[in-house]
Image: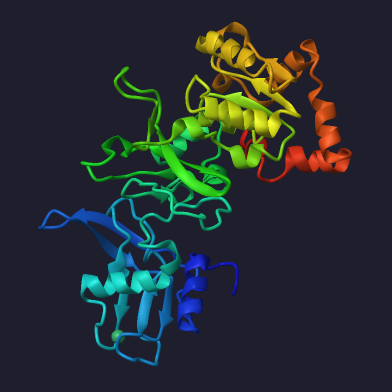
Amino acid sequence: MSGRLLRPELYDRLDRVFGHVRIAHEGVEMVSRPYLSADLEVRLDITTRGETYCVSCPFCGDTRQRLWINHRWGYWDLRTQTRNLWLAHCFNEECLRSYDRQQALYREVFADVGDGIRDVILPGAPPPAEPVEVIWPTQLIPLDQLPEDHDACRYLRSRGFDPVLLSKHLGLNYCPWTDPFVMSMAKDRIIIPITMNGEPRGWTGRFIGEPPNKFVPKYYHMRDLPRGELLYNFDQARRSPYVVVCEGPSDVWRVGPCSVALLGKHASLAQRALLAKHWGQGAVVILLDNDAIDEAQELYDQLRDTVPRRVLVHLPGGKDPGDLTREQLDQIIQGAARNQCVDLLSLVAAHGHGDAQKTEATNSPSFVENKLER
Ligand SMILES: [Zn+2]
């Protein structure tokens, strides 16, 4: 197909399900305006429908491609707060008039993403060996499907992060709505999935901006999140011969793929065991926030017998990892390591057996932050 399609991913899906797809009005964007209907629903007043994919309707046995599916169909729309499933129309027998039929079509096309609402992108997750009970907020939108000027995207960009890369590499989502009786505080947060060994283990939700008061947590975790068993970003960090231990996920986005977050200031016994098991032969760099000097020292001492090479980093001038750029952090970490006689660079070189692989280990595309600071 030509590269000018507006929804190439939808075209591919339809092609897989229906075999042959005809394209009408290729490259033409929909022009629409939201309005409040008499029954107080946000509807769209469409002046140009734009790019449309025509397939044979499976409901009436049509063979002349009279089921027209618009390029905005099935795509989350922040204005209507739906996927606009009415944007598929059978011109043969009006097969898609009922919402049930519209949903049936959606399920058919998006079979691999469940009900389509929880289409969380989990980086390279194989099916879990045994079911893990992860309860997601009711509605999630991958950040790369949000408009660029959405608050979540603006907030991340203002902190030097690229929402599209975070979405693609770390599966970040935005939660526009969730059942008020379960996990209501997930609403309007950036939902950060936590996977270990490829398995989804839960999530935490970052408040967008600074919380207005101390009753609103910066990070709101999934209920019963087994926090003490988890290290955020473990799967990427384990490929590095040393690990930088931080507090929160955004510290990890800042420091890079060789870092993990405790999801708090304290390391549990299980977290310390993970650090010892995976980096006992390597090195552990402790980089907590400035108000956690005691906790950082405690962790440094606790790892005495299991991790011989440890680095304790105190950031200068009362700064937290989030206040610095990746380059500044890297300099501070390398400087602290040198002062404390831990040679991180030779660990990396030994790990990679030479420079080519060292580059691979430190600059692989999954090193999200490499590109984010630019
Ligand atoms: Zn039909």
**Quadrant the C terminus occupies:** top right
Q: Quadrant of ligand 1?
A: bottom left
Residue visible at 32% across and 44% down? 176
- The residue furthest left is 38
User: At 22% from the left edge and 76% from the top edge, which residue is drawn?
Assistant: 97
Residue placed at 23% from the left, 72% from the top?
A: 100
- Who is closer to the viewer here, 318 or 269? 269
Looking at the image, the residue that sits furthest to the front is: 305
Residue 111 coordinates in the image, percent (x, y)? 42, 69
Write the residue at 33% across / 38% down: 188
- The image quadrant that residue 189 belongs to is top left
Whether residue 89 is situated above or below residue 183 in the rendered picture: below
Q: Position of residue 6 (x, y in %)?
A: 49, 65
* Nearer to me, 278 or 351: 278
User: Which of the colour schemes (rainbow, by chain, secondary structure, one colour) is used?
Assistant: rainbow
Query: Is residue 115 something one can see in this rendering?
Result: yes
Total labels: the figure holds 0
The relative height of residue 288 versus residue 372 in the rendered view (above or below) is above
Q: Is residue 207 visible?
A: no
Q: Quadrant of the N terminus?
A: bottom right
- Where residue 217 appears, x then y in whole percent? 35, 25
Choose between 337 and 61: the one closer to the eye.
Answer: 337
Q: Tell me where residue 28 sits by quadrant.
A: bottom left
- Above or below 26: residue 330: above
Q: Quadrant of residue 180?
A: top left
Residue 96, x across and y down, in percent: 26, 77
